[in-house]
Amino acid sequence: MDADVVVIGAGAAGLAAARALSGRRLRVVLLEARDRAGGRVWSRPTPRRATPAELGAEFIHGNAPQTMALLREAGAASIDITGEAWAKAATGALQPEDRDFAAAGAVFAQASELPEDESVERFLRRFADDESARAAAQRARDFVEGFEAADPAIASVQSIAAEWQSGVDRKSARPFGGYPPLLELLLGACVASGVELRLSTIVRRIVWRRGSVTVDASGSSGAQIVRARSAIVTLPAGVLRHAGGDGAVSFDPELPRAKRTALQSIEMGHVARVVLLFRTAFWERIAGGRYRDGGFFSGDRQPFGVYWTQLPVRSELVVAWAGGPRATALQARTPDALVELARDGFGELLGEASLARDEFEAGFTHDWTNDPFARGAYSYVAVGGGEARAALAAPLDATLFFAGEATSADGQGGTVNGALETGERAACELADA
Ligand SMILES: Cc1cc2nc3c(=O)[nH]c(=O)nc-3n(C[C@H](O)[C@H](O)[C@H](O)COP(=O)(O)OP(=O)(O)OC[C@H]3O[C@@H](n4cnc5c(N)ncnc54)[C@H](O)[C@@H]3O)c2cc1C
């Protein structure tokens, strides 16, 4: 045996699991396909150190107890999001907007009374002829596409309703200085307690039976075999669903039907996210300072539905965001074309296209959809898949344990905190077994 436990994937879930296990004096090998840890948490340093360019996760959603505890332990802090919201009205002018999604919550509350699950698209059609409810229904659709990065024609309305009812607080914050302190803390703790981290090691096959796991992988120095008594699999649902090609992982024997069925109901949402770095925060100066405290700028007809600044931190960095079908529509663009489109869209929204071009310094983006080790941004549940996350999370034969955001069944699927929590949960399940 090379180890007691092999952990597959060094994202938030894998790092949290490895750290928890190493504290229990188990020999842990952590295998990661990329040449870095962190997975879908990936920060690029910028010249403005307080605001790194987050290519993946940026926000802390809700109370996020694991995230907050780790930030505290790292001596870092979180900072609540502030800033006014501006939306492009039919007249073409930016008008103050109420970004409170409570109205969407009220719409989703009605979905829990449906006799059967249905798609968000179908559910929202019920409100089409009701003038008083139309705006709230649109808010609900914006939430599903923008936050969940989901396709309303596929997403389960009852799962979204259940998430709203789970009491997850909708408030958002950011780790001050980005996610790097949290990742460094986890990595440092793993290394210090003897976890053997192997980067650039792509897992191809997991052969398992009760009490024994053999992992075939390929690393920079050729084929590798790792033997352990058990494994924690933190592969993204997109990778688990992907039957062939780079990053695909096969199981021998194959995963039981319950898991395969669950995976069919866990979709990966798509996101186009561009970080724009400008020479100055020019939007604070234009229109007599009207947008000085602007946090969010949105426009229905824009390829990117929304842009946000870093308020309350004053910075020259702006994020352009498109989720769900809007992101899919942008898929064919090259990274450079996407950056240009984001820059020009921001300028047009503000009525300052040429100023935005003059002020532009750099843009950063990453294609998570075509990334073979992610295959999408984060997961959501498709129609009829209410129990899918729990089914994916269930251990097999006290030998294979499952973690990762897609296995979070308490309303935190798709988030960093969901991933951290499931990593700790899987480590406990394994230790108990
Ligand atoms: C653009 C974007 C924006 C987001 N914004 C937010 C946000 O604001 N707030 C928030 O809370 N969450 C956000 N998320 C979601 C959040 O990043 C994820 O939920 C979380 O990071 C997932 O962690 P994980 O450990 O489950 O998966 P991952 O981080 O994906 O970790 C899995 C690991 O497995 C590795 N792997 C894959 N295939 C193989 C293989 N064959 N062999 C070996 N290793 C393999 C991967 O490289 C990866 O490191 C965002 C995600 C994206 C993409």
Image: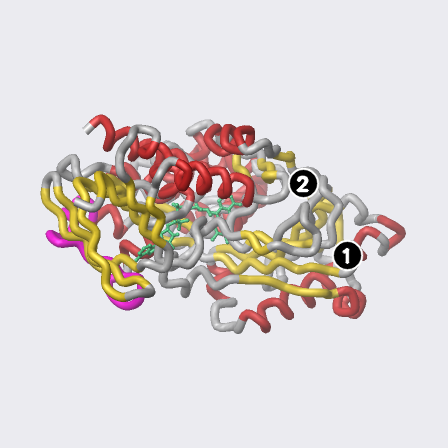
Q: Is residue 240 magenta?
A: no
For residue 36, what is the image quadrant? bottom left
For residue 339, what is the image quadrant? bottom right
Magenta stretch: dominant SS? loop
Residue occupying the point 52% across, 39% down: 182
Q: Which residue is denoted by mark 2 in the rendering?
A: 98
Residue occupying the point 34% across, 37% down: 17
The magenta-colored residue range is 243-259
Name the spot of residue 267 as percent of width and height, x first. 35, 52
Residue occupying the point 89% across, 52% down: 288
Q: Nearer the viewer, residue 394 or 288?
A: 394
Task: Give the numbered dot on residue 93.
Answer: 1
Name the spot of residue 283 as percent of width and height, x first. 79, 55
The quarter of the image holding the C terminus is top left
Q: Residues within 10 Å of mark 1 (few under 14, many from 20)?
A: some
Residue 47 visible to an observer of this rendering:
yes
The quarter of the image holding the N terminus is top left
Name the spot of residue 335 as percent of width and height, x first. 55, 70
Q: Residues within 10 Å of mark 2 (few under 14, many from 20)?
A: few
